[in-house]
Amino acid sequence: MPTNIINIVAIVSIVIWIAVSRELVKPSKEKNGQKIITLMTAASLSTLILTVSLFQNIQF
């Protein structure tokens, strides 16, 4: 993958993880379970993409 796409995915991943952490610190009455699941799925997927890209770029 080109470097600029990886950088964009990394920034988006950071923003999503921040949104997840903000949702999780809310009081239990205000938490939205569906939103947390959606954000966690998106964050995990973006992290997986970054991890795979990192291992593809490692030169042994």
Image (cartoon, rainbow, N blue to C red):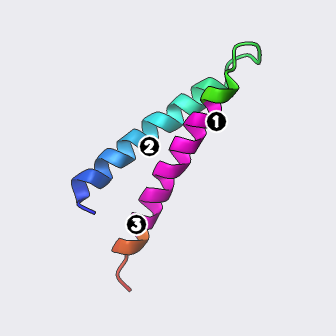
Furthest residue toward bottom: 60
Identify the residue under disc 1.
37
**Where is residue 45 drawn, in percent x and y?**
51, 51
Give the extent of the magenta segment.
Answer: 36-54
Q: Quadrant of the C terminus?
A: bottom left
Identify the element where label 3 is drawn: helix
First in sequence, mark 3 or 2: give its number: 2
Closest to the camera, between mark 1 and mark 2, is 1
First in sequence, mark 3 or 1: give its number: 1
Identify the residue under disc 2.
13
Position of 46 compared to 10: left or right?
Answer: right
Disc 3 from disc 1: Cα separation: 26 Å
First in sequence, mark 1 or 2: give its number: 2
Disc 3 from disc 2: Cα separation: 14 Å
Amino acid type, callout 3: Leu
Residue 28 sits in which quadrant?
top right
Question: Mark 3 touching mark 1, by CB under 8 A?
Answer: no
Identify the element where label 2 is drawn: helix
Local packing at callout 1 (Cα closer than 10 Å; few below 14, some 14-19, many 20+) is: few
Prevailing SS of the magenta stretch: helix
Disc 1 from disc 2: Cα separation: 15 Å
